[in-house]
Image (cartoon, rainbow, N blue to C red):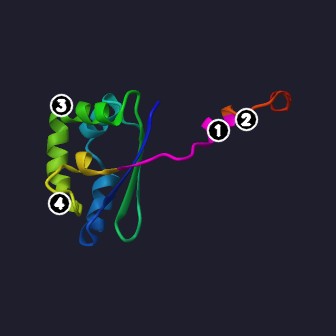
Amino acid sequence: MPRVCFQLQVKRDRIAEYRTRHAAVWPDMLRALHDTGWHNYSLFLREDGLLIGYFETPDSVAAAQAGMAATDVNARWQAEMGDFFEELDGQAPDEGFLVLEEVFHLEDQLIGTTTDDDVQK
């Protein structure tokens, strides 16, 4: 299952409201995310507004984005949240984020190092 990590920058003067909005995301938005393949989804916010997101999806980031783009709730959510971010150049937040390259995953590397001694432990 592909793992996706992304970065956005929340405007400093909107950080408190961003936190408040994400403390109670609309139930229909939560269902839409889940139903379109955004699993194990988390957001991490630094004090200066750096936002890191992570999710796993059964297909690809493009398929997960396309699934959400087809929902009515996503259009409403993106319209409300777009002003919270810097440097989107007219894109919706869920399309304008910077995807980060995964360079290490513990479980992937452990699979290649398992020995008979490890199995006996």
Query: Helix, strand or loop at disc 4?
Result: helix
**Of the two numbered discs 3 and 1 in the rendering, the one whose residue sits closer to the viewer:** 1
Q: Is residue 55 magenta?
A: no
Query: Helix, strand or loop at disc 3?
Result: loop
What is the CA distance from the residue labelled 1 to the residue labelled 2? 7 Å
Amino acid type shown at disc 4: Asp
Amino acid type shown at disc 3: Ala
Point out which mark residue 109 bears. Answer: 1
**Of the two numbered discs 3 and 2 in the rendering, the one whose residue sits closer to the viewer:** 2
Q: Position of residue 82 (x, y in %)?
A: 18, 55
Figure check: 50 above or below 1: below
Q: Is residue 107 magenta?
A: yes
What is the CA distance from the residue labelled 4 to the residue labelled 3? 21 Å
In the picture of the structure, the residue carrying the numbered disc 4 is: 83
Q: Position of residue 20 (x, y in %)?
A: 30, 59
What is the CA distance from the residue labelled 2 to the residue labelled 4? 47 Å
Crowding around mark 1 (Cα neighbors within 10 Å: few <14, some 14 to 19, many 20+) is few
Query: Helix, strand or loop at disc 1?
Result: helix
Amino acid type shown at disc 1: Gln
Based on the displayed image, in which of its 4 quarters is residue 111 positioned? Answer: top right
What is the CA distance from the residue labelled 3 to the residue labelled 1? 36 Å
Residues under numbered marks 1 and 2 in contact, where contact means CB atoms less than 8 Å apart: yes
Sooner in the amino-acid sequence: mark 3 or mark 2: 3
In the picture of the structure, the residue carrying the numbered disc 2 is: 113
Residues under numbered marks 1 and 4 in contact, where contact means CB atoms less than 8 Å apart: no
Question: Which span is picked out in magenta?
Answer: 99-110
